[in-house]
Image (cartoon, rainbow, N blue to C red):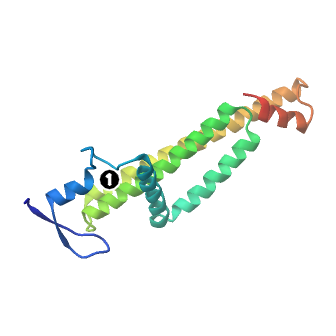
Amino acid sequence: MGKKKKITHEMSTQTDISYEDNKKNIINENNEWGSKNILQKIYFALQGCSYGFKKDKSMYLLLAILITVLILSVIFLPGLFNKGIIIFFSFIALSAELINTSIEETVDRIGLEYNVLSKNAKDLSAAASLIIYTGLIIVCIFAIASCIIKSDTLHKNKIIENTGGYICQTFCEA
């Protein structure tokens, strides 16, 4: 057959798996790489999200903050564009944290002993997440500031004189 490789799994003992056996598990019956259908891909993605939350407890704090930001933006920000930008950046921030966790897991898989390159890889992935969080904060500040300025202008011009008018403008303006 083929050459045997020793593969160590985190929870299991070492097993011998030939290259051909491993290749059969990865290639589906149409000789295409990847999973067989879209439902499997969604299942694997949900497994990754679940693992991200199990592995990195700060994901719960991030998710709570993002849900709060999303709810507040949907309620208080006028216009679909402002809401869409906030929602988009929120999903990007969550994705960045998952990518950060996957890079940390990959580096830990390579070796747990201290290595400058491993430290740099982890630091760089954390920096990427930090930059996206900073972008999200800046976008939120600009969206809120533009709403305050617009609302103040509308009040001065007596276009909106009550809270009902503001709510109507918030949900009706595109």
Pick whichever, 74 or 9, lies toward us.
9
Res 173 → quadrant: top right
Give the vertical position of 112 relative to 117 (above or below).
below
As drawn, is 137 to the left or to the right of 118? Answer: right
Where residue 19 appears, as percent x and y from the top left, is 15, 58
User: Where residue 169 sits in the image (x, y, percent)?
Assistant: 81, 31
In this picture, is 116 found above or below 28? below
Identify the secondary structure beneath mark 1.
Answer: helix
Q: Amino acid at mark 1?
A: Ala
Instruction: Quadrant for the C terminus, please.
Output: top right
Rendering coords of residue 107 (x, y %): 30, 59
Q: Residue furthest top?
A: 157
Residue that appears at 43% across and 46% down: 38
Vertical placement of residue 39 versus 159, above or below: below
**Residue lying at the far bottom of the rendered structure:** 13
Taking depth in this image into account, of 52 and 155 the one nearest to the observer is 52
Residue nearer the viewer, 93 or 31? 31
In the image, taking residue 132 as reference, residue 64 lies left or right, namely: right
Residue at position x 60%, y 36% in the image:
85
Quarter in which the N terminus is drawn: bottom left
- Decide if residue 54 is in sight here: yes
Q: Position of residue 51 (x, y in %)?
A: 44, 63
Residue 126 in view (yes/no) = no
Look at the picture and state if 86 lies above or below 114.
above
Find disc 1 in the rendering and name its residue: 121
Residue found at the far front of this picture: 29
**Which residue is painted at 45% across and 55% down in the image?**
43
Q: How many numbered dots are placed on residues in this image? A: 1
The residue depicted at 65 percent of the width and 31 percent of the height is 81
Q: Residues within 10 Å of mark 1 (few under 14, many from 20)?
A: some
